[in-house]
Structures are given as structure tokens and as C-alpha cells.
Image (tube, grey):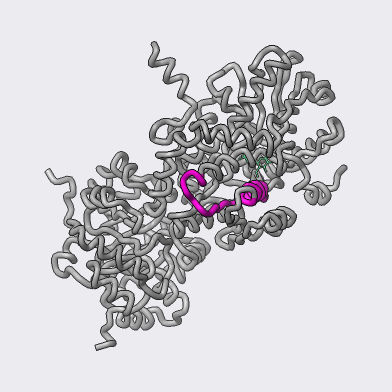
Amino acid sequence: MAAVTELQKTFYHVDENGYYGKFGGAYIPEMLYPNVEELKENYLKIMYSPDFQQEFHKLLKDYVGRPTPLYLASRLSEKFGASIYLKREDLCHTGAHKVNNTIGQVLLARRLNKKRIIAETGAGQHGVATATICALMGMPCKVFMGAVDMQRQKPNVERMRILGAEVIPANSGSKTLKDATNEALRHWINNPVDSHYVIGSVVGPHPYPDMVARFQAVVSAEIRQQLKEETGTEKPDYVVACVGGGSNAAGAYYHFLEDTEVKLIAVEAAGMGVHSGKSAATTALGKIGIIHSSKTLLMQTDDGQITEPHSISAGLDYPGIGPLHAHLYDTGRGTFYSITDDEAMEAGILLSRMEGIIPAIESAHAIAVLHQMELKSDDVVVVSLSGRGDKDLETYIRWGKY
Amino acid sequence: MSVVNTYNRIDQVFEEKEESILSVYYTAGFPALNDTVRIAEYLEKAGADFIEIGMPFSDPLADGPTIQDSSTQALHNGMSLKLLFEQLRDVRQSVSLPMILMGYMNPVMQFGVENFCQHCQQVGVDALILPDLPMQEYLNEYKELFESYGLYNIFLITPQTSEARIRLIDEHSHGFIYMVSSASITGAKSNITEEQLAYFDRIRAMKLKNPTLIGFGISNYETFSHACSYANGAIIGSAFIKVLQESNDLEKSITQFITSVKGADHR
Ligand SMILES: Cc1ncc(COP(=O)(O)O)c(C=O)c1O
């Protein structure tokens, strides 16, 4: 009996081999083995050492501005007929949840005596967060970014440069996030001794998905506490988050994974429609395979070539999802929806008009799904508002319907 | 009972010749879709010892720009695993050198790993290099399967690989061990550094049971012969891809290149 409880407790967490059910692992070339092994051997020890915890939480508080508010969006609540709380990750320094992970990993890299930081970025959000923390710590930082994304996200490219990072265009393959990730991994292969690669989501080889989820877990730790203060109970009925790789979702779900009465809602980008050929809805379109050294669901051709996704939000424009999410999907623990570009843009305007909050287009996907959920008046819904819309102003302007 | 039940051409070559083994890598379906087999034939005629055929993949993590570009081109040409096995169906009528397939796990998984092994055996493949298949995963999941189809799994080692791990890899290897000459993705580099030499020395002193081939960064007679003084031979990839790319007469270019790498034109 005790064994069963123990199993249930860990069912949604990574096992000792780096798997969530049948997903995960570390399908790395031998060239990366020493680095990844070093990380695997040390990450938990370092993360849970008292001095690390103290430094990490102090920075989260004084530098990032945590805890971020849990805000009861009353007009939105009225519209959807349930209590809608927004977890305001958009108020983090640098404008999104990404920085929680970045601080954690850079602190960890320092304790592993790494001198240089490498990162990939799609929208530029993770790149900016990494460049920011590297500036703070005085560490040299190289950010790989698809050449196409550099065109799409010019302000973030310049933000990174202002912060002193070197932005390196990824010109291989489709020149977007997946290629930037390949280039970052290659750079790490070529510079294995003194560099740490800061992955920006719960993707990549074990231990990255678990490590990033643990750094982002501060989000759900705060939600529990804040909700208790607000409503007297720690557990909402729903936690809703968008999923690109899945880091804001992993953070928002983390401390609810075993509380199966809390329903976990994952929102993927349908792009121009799930079956339009221009989509990033991985669970709807993907099959199990290996992407960026992790066995997970990914979008691919019948021959196993990874396909290029599409979403209006660069942060959701990734052909895979983290192995934790593949497992949540596979086991039914998570319910997956998809939201089109237009639905997301409309939800972005809706939130702007009703609550005075212009969300990142990624986060707008999580707002849009409220239309599709069948909510009851006593439901308590927490939506992860993962980022603010500043970076997306040009996209809002180009879309134009406001 | 020995699990490896078929006679492997790689062992046969090493029985006859222990040094200056030249293994040549190229990407299937490149430069043109149907060049795969004739390149193998030209390589055999020109005097290569092993043929390494790359199965193109959209996201080849361990490869440099030259090989990735050739993969992108091959995919664009319409290359796929299914087509590769069709192209190789009769290759054993004209090519007798050991044939190694190199590629990434995802296309193999989608093809079906057992189905893949079956096809490999049918067309006469001797070994596989799957850089993103880690040793532990191989031992747990695939070793028996590969061996039952007579396929050797070739492991890589790097300057960062610990001695204990090299010993373990040596224990589980058949055929040869692929020494990555620097902690590096593929891509022709012009010279061999002091650091690499120290690494080559260190490995040589370990007296492994398997032969070693040095790969990554070998591009010409100088680098090839230098590598051969430390290992049983070497692997050329990116430099050969460049030759193919620039050639307007494949047979002639391949013969010239292989001849010059082996130093036959230096004598
Ligand atoms: C604001 C925001 N939300 C969500 C995402 C998607 O990433 P993840 O799924 O890892 O949270 C991004 C990625 O750039 C982002 O910037």
C-alpha cells in the first residue's frame, strides 16, 4: 500500500532514468555526455543547498519582483461566469516567467565553475532573460537565434545587444527556434569545458526538463499560498497555461501534479488551424520521436523529418513539447486544447479592454481557451499570464483589428 | 552461443590490414538523388576501405554546416530511408567494402527499429553509427536486436570521455571505435593540435581491444597520414562532401581525391 502511494506521488515526476512514463531520457551524442552527466550528478545537490536557495530566492524577490500577484480578474470572471485569477508572470522583470529559470541556471552554472553562458531563443524572451542575468553576473553570453526570428523580433535582438550579449544568427535548416537550439547544442559540443547551456524551456535531454520545471515551480508554490489567502483553499479547479516547450505550464502545474482534482489545461497554438499545414499544435499533429535529445511528441513527416511549425506567437512556434507534457497528455492528466492565431489575438484585445492588461500573444492563447471550457459559477480558474505584450506590439499593430 | 552470427566485413578488412584504413562518409541522395550507389562503386574502385553512408535528417545535431547542408539538399532531392533501402537493394552486386549507415534515431524510430535492422541486413549493411543513441539506451533496448541482424553498433569517444567510460565502450564495441578528434561537430579543420595529439597518445597507450579510427577534421594526405600514425585509420566526411559538391565528374573527382588522401600520388 505504501509503495502504491509512493508511486502515485512520483507518477508525474521524472524517474531516476530521466523519464516521465515513456517520454524523456537523454538521447545525446557522446560529445555531450560529460556535460550532461555533470549536470545530472549535481543539479539537485546544488539547487537544494541552503546557500543556493537563499541566493535564488533573494534574487527572485528583490530583482525579479516576486511573488508576482495572483489577481482576481473581476470583469473577466463576470464574462466567463467563474472566478478567473491571473498569475501575473507578466510583471516579472524582463516581462515573462522565463527569468525564473534563467536565474536558477546561471547561479547553478557559476557553482559548476562555468565561465560562459550559451542560450537559444525564439521570440527573444528567453534570450533577453539570459542576457539580463549574464549582465547582472558579469558573465559572457552568446544567444543563438534563428535568422528568420531575428527579423521577426528585432526589438528583442537589440535588447540583448544592449545588455551585452552576442546574438548569433542560426542559418541552418528553417532558421527558427529548432535550428537555434541545434546551433546552441553544437556550440556546447565545441566548447564543452567552461560553458553552460541555459535551455529556455522544459525540453532537451534529462535533467533539463526536470531542472527547468523545478526552477519554474515557484509559480505554483506561490499560487497555492496566494489562493489560500484569497479563498481559504489552496487548490483551484483549473490551472490553465499555454505550452510552447511548456515551462510556464510546468511551473504553474508543478505543485498540483498529484492533486488530481485540480484539472490541468494546456493550450497549444493551432496557428492558422490545426489541419491548415500552418500549426504548432503538437499533441494534435505529433507522434512520439526524438527532438533535441528528448523522446517526446513532435511534429514530423512520415519519414521522421522534423517539420516546421507555425504560430503567430514566436514563443509557441516549436515542433515539440517537453516530455512532462507528453506524459500528461498520454495519461490524460492534462487536457489539451488548441487556439488559432486569430482567437489568440482577439483574446489579447479582450484582456486589454476588460482588465487593462496587454498580454504576450503566447499568454493570450491561455485566455482564449476560456471560451472553450465549460465553466461553472463556483469554479476557480488560475490562468498563467506568462508574459506581457510589449514585445508583441508590432504583431498587434500588423493584425490591426482593434 | 555467439549472438553475432554473421560474418562481418569490417572484421574481414581488419584481418587483412591493420593500418591506414580509410573510411569515407557521404550523404545518401547527394549531390543528386540517385548518386548513392555509384559513389560507393567509385569509392571502392578508388581504394577506400570503408563506406559510410549518411541517412539525411532535418536536425543533425552532431554535424557541422557542410554535412547538414548536404542533408538538407538530399532531403530536398527527395531522399528517405525507404528510398535509400531501394537504392541499396542490389549494391552488394557491385560493392564489397564494409558499408556503415550513419544517422539519427528519429527517422530510424519512425521506420521501425526492427524493420530498419531487417532492411540493413537484407541490403548488406555491416554497422551503424547513431550518434544520438547513447550507450546505456543501446545496451538496454537495442543491443540484442542489432546483433541478431549482424549489425555492429559503432561508438564514439571524445577527448572528454573518461578512461572508465572508454573501457566500458571498448568492452561493448565490435568492429571499431570512432575517435572524435576534438570535442567537435563534424567539419573539416586544417590541422591537428597539440591537445589532440596528447589525446591520441593517451588512447593509444590504453591498448584497447578494438581498432580505432579517427574522425572529424581529417581532410587531406597530411591530416590522414598523421591520424594513421596514432590509430588504425581515419574517417573523412566534410572534405569529401565538398569534393562531391564541386565536382562535375564524380568518378574522376573521387578517384583523384582518394588517391591524394592515401598519398599514392606522393610516391
Ligand atoms: C510570454 C511567453 N509565454 C510562453 C512562452 C512559451 O514557452 P513555455 O511553453 O516554455 O512557457 C514564451 C516563450 O518564449 C513566452 O515568451
Q: With respect to residue A117, does B93 lie above or below?
A: below
In what quadrant does ligand 1 lie?
top right
- The residue lying at 39 percent from left, 35 percent from top is A17
Q: Quadrant of residue B244?
A: bottom left
Q: With respect to residue A26, does B194 lie above or below?
A: below
Is A36 or B6 nearer to us in this picture?
A36
Is B88 or A383 nearer to us in this picture?
A383
- The residue lying at 36 percent from left, 72 percent from top is B192
Q: Where's the C terminus of chain B, which quadrant? A: bottom left
Q: Give the side of residue B109 with respect to residue A246, left or right.
A: left
Residue B74 is situated, as x and y percent measured from the top left of the image, at: 48, 64
Is A35 or B138 nearer to us in this picture?
A35
Q: Taking the image as drawn, is residue A279 in sight?
A: no
Q: Quadrant of residue B21?
A: bottom left
Residue A366 is situated, as x and y percent measured from the top left of the image, at: 70, 33
- The residue lying at 14 percent from left, 46 percent from top is B2
Q: Give the side of residue A335 with respect to residue B47, left or right.
A: right
- The residue lying at 43 percent from left, 34 percent from top is A19
| Numbered label tally | 0
Q: Taking the image as drawn, is residue B2 in sight?
A: yes
Is B233 or A79 nearer to us in this picture?
B233
A125 within the magenta span? yes
Residue B51 is situated, as x and y percent measured from the top left of the image, at: 30, 66
B70 within the magenta span? no
Q: With respect to residue A369, does B226 lie above or below?
A: below
Region rendered in magenta: A109-135
